[in-house]
Amino acid sequence: MNNALLKVYVKLQCLIMEEEGQDMVEYGLVVALIGLGSIVTMKAAATSFGTMFSNLASIAVANS
């Protein structure tokens, strides 16, 4: 039983020490940050465009 636990412990230590997966995690975090920034920017732009078009429509109705 001790031998099996030792093997599991050694495998976990090897997984923790590997740096190959670290790059993928970093890329994933960068992609998530870019996506979040894009969503926030697009929401702000959509609100601004909506307000602008509403103002243009009200001006067009007032002038006709």
Image (cartoon, grey):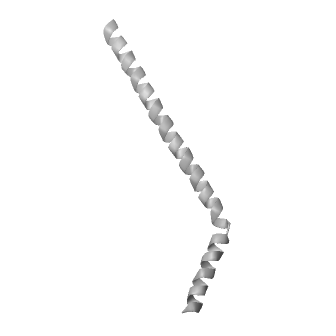
Q: Quadrant of the C terminus?
A: top left
Q: Quadrant of residue 55?
A: top left
- Of residues 37 and 10, the one nearer the viewer is 10
Quadrant in the rendering for residue 3: bottom right
Residue at 53% across / 41% down in the picture?
37
Residue at (57% x, 53% y) in the render: 29
- Report x, y in % for residue 38: 52, 40
Work out whether 49 lies above or below 18.
above
- The image shows residue 47 at horizontal and vertical percentages of 42, 29
Residue 20: x, y in percent? 67, 66
Q: Residue at x 34, y 14 (%)?
A: 58
Q: How many marks?
A: 0
Q: Can the viewer see residue 24?
A: yes
Say if 31 sits above or below 59 in the image.
below
Q: Position of residue 26 (x, y in %)?
A: 62, 56
**24 shown above or below 14:** above
The residue furthest top is 63
Above or below, comparing residue 28 to residue 17 in the picture: above
19 vs 54, nearest the viewer: 19
